[in-house]
Image (cartoon, rainbow, N blue to C red):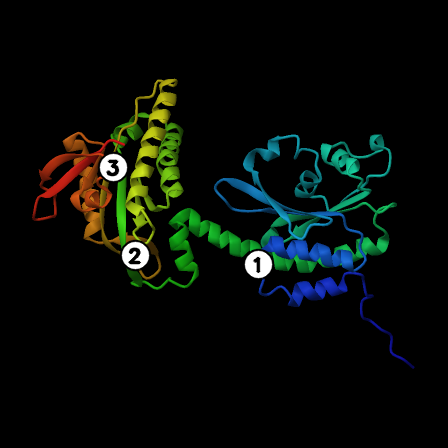
Amino acid sequence: MTAPDHNPPATLSDGVIGWLTNGTRDERFIDNIFAEMCIRLQQAGIPLARSTLHVRIQHPQWLGARIMWSDGKREAEISRVDFDVQQRSEYIGSAAHEIFEGAAEVRENLERDPSLGRKHALYDEMRAKGLTDYVAWPLHHTLGKRHLVTFATDRPGGFDDAHVAALKNVLPVLALVSEIRVKNRLARTLLETYVGSHAGELILAGATRRGTGTTVRAAIMICDLRDFTKISDNWPRDDVIDLLNDYFDAMSEPIARHGGEILKFIGDGLLAIFPLSQPNACANLLHAVTEARQAMAALNERNKTTSRAPLNYGIGVHVGDVMYGNIGSSSRLDFTVIGPAVNMASRLEALTKKLGRTVLLSRDFAELVQPKFELEHVGQHEVRGFSDPIELFAYQG
């Protein structure tokens, strides 16, 4: 007597599942994997015309991302989704809304009379493109994280039972493969958010041992907000937070745009470097300062409408060698820069208030940007912690 076969029945997607399991190890990006998966599903006989993967991410600006593939494309399109989407009509009543509210499946027959189906602009758009059937399922990651995957076809009659069974069989493996990539991207995003892109890359590459680092020659910029203690003592807490965020936006965006890296926010101040390995690093720093001053002027104009006093600040700039790496306790590290050059930039920032200048530059830095920039010579001055007077220049931008 032949023993009964207890193996699960084969489905159209078995080959795709094998590829997802064993053939994607060297692919870093989930959008590339997703597009290739959809093409392979087509080749396996599933009449796929459109598919999307929606993932929620931990990002300071974005709620999540949507990856969309459509018939004939070799690559998927990625679009970011902002936090406000949940209050907009594009989300309310959509399949994503239903799934994230707990639905186990959303299936819509797009061939039937629209008056009998779900009411949402998405379904009207898909009908207009000739799609006939649509299905959405939750994609479960670990620890209760729920994402979303959708499939649509233009086959007359829609997906049949074999197609749906094959697509469902893909979901557990797609969940595992996507979670690995999403978490890799999440780790990168969190590091970029909290320590900067360059430091984040070094940490991901293994630079996590205390005391390890490298010497970098860089232009150093330290900025500090004036009278912040008075502001924080007299303003409501939420207003203070809004003010700081607006101030840091005005300062930070030009720095990033011109190739600088913000290493840390220190209360109401920030520390940024422009490594001299980058072409025109010192000039780029001054371009960033110019744009930051313009952004601060615009911010102060906006603040006038709410009767807020203008925000003042000081910037100190120096150039030199810094130690760039891990410093801290055995269990809590900070990836930052230290050294006399950083101390000098900090002292120059403190002198801006005494000398009545918004931006002060050391002679070492000024020599690298003259005569391309017009600088005001403000003489030699004693700098706390340094034995000899330092020749200083002011920059008006």
The disc, 1 or 3, on the residue closer to the chain's N-terminal end is 1
Write down the residue under mark 1. 180
Q: Is residue 150 visible?
A: no
Could you tell me residue 162's position as x and y percent?
84, 56
Could you tell me residue 59's position as x and y percent?
50, 44
372 or 226, nearer to the observer: 372
240 or 160, nearer to the observer: 160
Considering the numbered disc 2 on the image, is that residue within a helix, a strand or a loop? strand
Could you tell me residue 109's position as x and y percent?
83, 41
Q: Are marks 2 and 3 in contact (CB under 8 Å)?
A: no
Q: In the displayed structure, would residue 85 be above or below residue 149?
A: above
Considering the numbered disc 3 on the image, is that residue within a helix, a strand or a loop? loop
Q: Are marks 1 and 3 in contact (CB under 8 Å)?
A: no
Closer to the camera: disc 2 or disc 3?
3
Q: Is residue 94 visible?
A: yes
The disc, 2 or 1, on the residue closer to the chain's N-terminal end is 1
Write down the residue under mark 2. 324
Q: In the displayed structure, would residue 376 be above or below residue 105?
A: above
Write down the residue under mark 3. 373
Residue at horizontal 61 percent and vertical 34 percent from the top: 86
Q: In the displayed structure, would residue 129 be above or below residue 69?
A: above
Determine the CA span between mark 2 and mark 3.
Answer: 29 Å
Type of amino acid at the residue the image marks with label 3:
Phe
In the rendered image, which quarter is residue 390 located in?
A: top left
Marker disc for residue 206: none
Considering the numbered disc 1 on the image, is that residue within a helix, a strand or a loop? helix
Residue at horizontal 87 percent and vertical 78 percent from the top: 3
Type of amino acid at the residue the image marks with label 1:
Ile
Determine the CA span between mark 1 and mark 3.
Answer: 49 Å
Q: In the displayed structure, would residue 170 be above or below residue 353?
A: below
